[in-house]
Each structure stands twice: as C-alpha cells, then as structure tokens.
Image (tube, grey):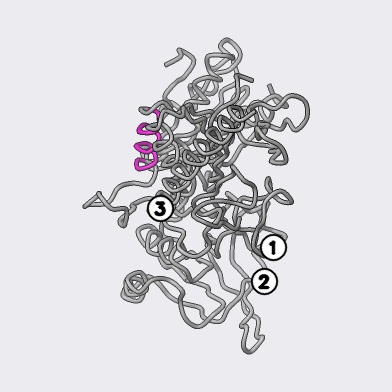
C-alpha cells in the first residue's frame, strides 16, 4: 500500500471519470479503481462500452461511439494526474477512517488502498431473465449486448426482451443485420422515449409481442426459440428465433456496500445534500444512486458534484482538525 | 507487438494453427466491439509473458467471417485455444487478466 490517498474513486464510467477529472484538477491526485474487463456493463468505462452511437451526449453534433467517448474521458482524467488501476474491488471497510479498500479477491490482511474520502461510481448492470438455460446459452445465441453480437445474426429472426429505451435501441440496431426483430414486452405499451418509439413503429423489420413473458429459452447448444406466456390470457406459445437479446432493466452494483451504506429497497445508494451518503466522507454518483435518469450526462454531472462535495468536505475536516489542535 | 502474435485470416488459418508447435490462442475480434478493445492489451501482455509456450492469433471476424462461422463464434470477444490443430478451450466474453490466466492454466 502506498500511503493514504485524499480520494479513492471506485468505478470508471462517466460518473467516476468526471469525478477524477475534477479532483485531479483540484490537485487531489485521485486514485481510480476502474474495474476488470468483462462483457457486461460492469467493466472499465461502464455501460457505454457496450453501446454504439451515443447521440445525446452534448458536444458531439454527429454523435460518438460509446467506447470512444469513454476513451476520451479516461485520457482527460489521466491528463490531470488521476492514477488509474485496473482491478476489481472485493471489499470495502467504511466503519473507520481512513476508509479501506481491498482488490482482486482479497478481503483480509492489509488493505490494498486507503483513502480519506471515497467516491462510489460503480454504476448498474443489465438484468438477466433468471431462467435456467440462460447461463449455458449466453454467448451462444443469447446476448445482453446487441452491438457486440448483432453481427452474427445476419438474416435470422431475432427476439429482444424489454420495452425501455435500451431494448428499443438494441432492436433498431439489430434491424441492420436481422431478417426480423420481435420485441417481446410484458406490457401493452413501451416505456421507451417518444423518439425511439416512433423509430421502432416506423421500422418494417420490427414486430411486437405485447403482454408477453418469456418462460423458457429453447435450444440445444444454441438458441432456437422461446416459450412465451400471454400475461392477460395465460396462453402459452412458442416463437422460433435464431437469437435472443435481453434488455429488461438494470440493478445497481452495490453488493460491496450492503450493510455499510443506506440503500433504497432496490439497492440504490441513497444520497442527501448533493452526493453525501449515510457515511460521512463517502459520496455516491452516477447510476449507483440514480434509478430515474440513468444518462451518461447526468452521471457525469453527479460525478462532478461528488468531486466538489469530497473536496469541500476534506477541506472542512482538515480545517476543523487544525482548529482543534490550536485550541489545545 | 510481441513476435508471437500472428494475424490470422480465412486463407492462412489452418496452416498457422496446424504448423504451430506451441498452443495458439485465437482472439476473434472486431473493430466495433468495445469489450474486444479491453482484452487486446491483456493478450499482448500474456503473449510477452508466455513466449515460447503460447502464440496469440488475431482473427478479425469482419474480414474473416468464414472461419468465425466454422467455429460457431456467436459472440465476441471469443477466445479459442488450439493445441495440435484442435480446439481445446473456449472462453466467451471479455475477462480480466487474472481470470483469463486461471482458465488457460487448466489447459496449458
């Protein structure tokens, strides 16, 4: 372990890296623990690493690729002195200050890092259906990343489960390759934004199966279809598919902090007065504390807030310590 | 780039895999795949560390779809380890270095 850091940032999506840019510019030499590569949204760069065109991040008139955008965030953070470590946090201890962090499977012994303040920006991950065949078929026709895998489904009939923005984005993207795309949604209307809905309804390759739930993924070796249940009539049916993409929502990556920080019933970290959590000196930003907006730009904005909150808190505690010393 | 990283294509694939004395770990990747970009530098490191024992083969699936189809690659990154020309191990999805080495160790 190399000394106690002013600030440790856990996570490296838009929230974590914006916090790194701001704390870096404030000469706090932030340590960013960016995570480990994976094919889920829980990886360095976060969920944007799994997207293609980002059209709504201000400043990019013609849009930008998600991984390219995160590359620029990272380079900008490094430019201001952020130290970025590729590792996954395995345990945190927030019960005493400085806060302790262990990485890469360690959870006992000397902590890997210690920090006077901590900014949590671990984001959220895509939910799976929770069906038995899911693990065997993942990467074999079942995918949570259309931009990674869509290419392999040329001229096939594909299903997309979900009705929000990410489901519709995936469905539209997949029409570039697929013969047809069937959106399977358990309600009878979409949750996606108006512009995405319009695009989906206008696209001749996209069909909808409303009020439908996937009860089973079929396939021996690779996906061949799904069993559906109509949630209103209870009727069961089979739909033949050459691939299935799941985009049914997100869960926050907060297992690490369970029992140490206040959370809402869905596991999102609760914040007050900006980005403060229930433990003084610990701040949370981005999707890990936001189940409402969940945008790259809102995550970046709250990462900036966490940086400023952490900087001011550190100054105030240092000042209070000095005063206490001069009075004694 | 380390000398034990080779660029594979539909036309040289069989020859490169079969003629190799070392095991070959083939990385099925594409330019547009974010997780592939995360794995690439890790594979470079592994190539350097395991020189003489392992070669890394890079196969761009955009340009070499035939080989990707032949090995039923349906998700990238996919890594397939070949020994004596035969596939021995398949790793689907991006992984950290520690986990990759652990999975490779069972076969190497």
Q: Residues within 10 Å of mark 2 (few under 14, many from 20)?
A: some
Q: Are marks 2 and 3 in contact (CB under 8 Å)?
A: no
Q: What residue sits right under mark 2 in the picture?
A: A215
Q: As drawn, which residue projects farthest toward the left?
A: A61
Judging depth in this view, the residue of A288 and A214 nearest the camera is: A288
Residue A99 magenta-drawn?
A: no
Callouts 2 and 3 in the same chain: yes
Quarter occupied by residue A23: top left
Measure how far apart labels 3 and 1 are at the Cα level: 30 Å
Give how far across and how far down residue A322 sits, in percent: 56, 29
Between disc 3 and disc 1, the foreground one is: 3
Q: Are marks 2 and 1 in contact (CB under 8 Å)?
A: yes
For numbered disc 1, what is the local secondary structure? Answer: loop
Q: What residue sits right under mark 3 in the picture?
A: A296
Sooner in the amino-acid sequence: mark 3 or mark 1: 1
Q: Residues within 10 Å of mark 1 (few under 14, many from 20)?
A: few
Q: Residue at x 30, y 47 (%)?
A: A64
Give how far across and how far down residue A95 sits, in percent: 72, 41
For numbered disc 2, what is the local secondary structure? Answer: strand
Q: Residue at x 59, y 14 (%)?
A: B50
Image check: A170 left or right of B89? left
Decide whether the magenta segment is chiefly helix, strand or loop.
Answer: helix
Q: As drawn, which residue projects farthest toward the top?
A: B52
Sooner in the amino-acid sequence: mark 2 or mark 1: 1
User: Magenta segment range?
Assistant: A68-78
Give how far across and how far down residue A242 sits, in percent: 52, 61
**Quarter of the image that includes the C terminus of chain A:** top right
């Amino acid at each position: 372990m190399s000394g106690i850091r002013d600030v440790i940032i856990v996570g490296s999506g838009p929230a974590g890296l914006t916090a790194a840019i701001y704390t870096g510019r404030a000469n706090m030499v932030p340590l960013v623990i960016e995570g480990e590569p994976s094919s889920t949204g829980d990886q360095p760069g976060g969920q944007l690493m799994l997207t293609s065109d980002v059209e709504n991040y201000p400043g990019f008139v013609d849009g930008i690729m998600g991984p390219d955008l995160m590359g620029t965030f990272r380079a900008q953070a490094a430019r201001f002195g952020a130290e970025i470590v590729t590792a996954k946090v395995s345990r945190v201890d927030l019960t005493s200050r400085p806060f302790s962090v262990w990485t890469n499977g360690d959870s006992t012994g000397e902590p890997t890092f210690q920090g006077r303040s901590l900014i949590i920006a671990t984001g959220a991950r895509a939910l799976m259906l929770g069906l038995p065949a899911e693990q065997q078929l993942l990467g074999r026709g079942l995918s949570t990343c259309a931009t990674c895998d869509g290419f392999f489904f040329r001229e096939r009939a594909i299903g997309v489960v979900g009705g929000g923005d990410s489901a519709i984005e995936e469905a539209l993207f997949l029409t570039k390759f697929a013969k047809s795309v069937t959106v399977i949604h358990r309600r009878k209307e979409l949750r996606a934004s108006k512009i995405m809905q319009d695009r989906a309804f206008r696209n001749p390759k996209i069909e909808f199966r409303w009020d439908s739930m996937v009860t089973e993924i079929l396939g021996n070796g690779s996906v061949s279809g799904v069993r559906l249940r109509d949630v209103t009539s209870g009727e069961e049916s089979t739909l033949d598919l050459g691939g299935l993409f799941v985009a049914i929502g997100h869960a926050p990556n907060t297992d690490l902090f369970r029992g140490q920080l206040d959370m809402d019933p869905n596991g999102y970290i609760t914040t007050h007065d900006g980005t403060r959590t229930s433990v003084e000196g610990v701040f949370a930003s981005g999707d890990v504390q936001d189940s409402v907006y969940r945008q790259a730009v809102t995550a970046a904005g709250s990462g900036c807030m966490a940086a400023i909150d952490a900087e001011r808190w550190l100054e105030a505690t240092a000042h209070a310590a000095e005063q206490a010393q001069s009075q004694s | 780039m380390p000398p034990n990283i080779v660029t594979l294509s539909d036309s040289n694939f069989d020859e490169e895999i079969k003629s190799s004395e070392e095991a070959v770990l083939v990385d099925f990747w594409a330019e547009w795949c974010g997780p592939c970009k995360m794995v690439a530098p890790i594979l470079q490191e592994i190539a350097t560390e395991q020189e003489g024992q392992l070669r890394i083969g890079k196969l761009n699936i955009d340009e070499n779809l035939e080989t990707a189809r032949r090995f039923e690659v349906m998700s990238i990154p996919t890594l397939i380890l070949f020994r004596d020309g035969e596939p021995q191990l398949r790793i689907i999805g991006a992984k950290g270095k520690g986990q990759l080495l652990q999975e490779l160790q069972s076969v190497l």
